[in-house]
Amino acid sequence: MIEIIVQEYLAEQLSVPVVLSHETGLPDSYVILEKTSSTKVDQVKSATFAFQSYAPSLYEAVKLNELVKSAVESLIELNEISGVHFNSDYNYTDTETKQYRYQAVFDIGFF
């Protein structure tokens, strides 16, 4: 599963936990990754991922987001990855829980 490949790689690259969903006991800073869609055209697979960087302040969320973007872009080094394309990033602070977060969206091609 591409989610596991991406999660394990980012966990090695970042100094914060990288998880697939909210978990109890997470520290103040962490990253949640979510595959939002996927497709397959002429045997070429692609998925869109949202990476949510949580931190105790907006400034720290922005800094973590930049680290996440660099780590995601380096996924291209893996044999299973055929392409990494940055879509966008933006402030995605959770107004309900009042947690600061930034979200980066990427399209990732894979074999």
Image (cartoon, helix red, strand yellow):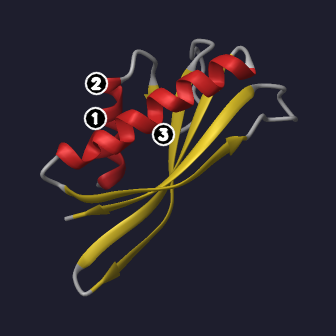
Residue situated furthest left in the rendering = 79
Say which residue appears at 28% left-offset and 24% top-offset.
12
Q: Separation of disc 3 and disc 1 at Cα?
A: 13 Å
Say which residue appears at 39% left-offset and 35% top-offset.
70
- Location of mark 2 (residue): 12
Q: Percent x, y for residue 81?
A: 22, 55
Task: In the rendered view, tell whether residue 79 sits above or below residue 72.
Answer: below
Could you say which disc has been placed on residue 9 in the image?
A: 1
Q: In this view, does 99 lie to the left or right of 78?
A: right
Task: In the rendered view, tell whether residue 58 sits above or below residue 66.
Answer: above
Q: Which amino acid type corresponds to the residue marked 3 in the rendered image?
A: Leu
- Location of mark 3 (residue): 20
CB within 8 Å, label 1 to label 2: yes
Q: Label 2 neighbourhood size at 10 Å, few (<14), some (14-19), many (20+)?
A: few
Residue situated furthest right in the rendering = 96
Q: Label 3 neighbourhood size at 10 Å, few (<14), some (14-19), many (20+)?
A: some
Q: Which amino acid type corresponds to the residue marked 1 in the rendered image?
A: Tyr
- In terms of image quadrants, where is residue 7? top left
Residue situated furthest bottom in the rendering = 42
Which comes before the other along the chain, label 3 or label 2?
2
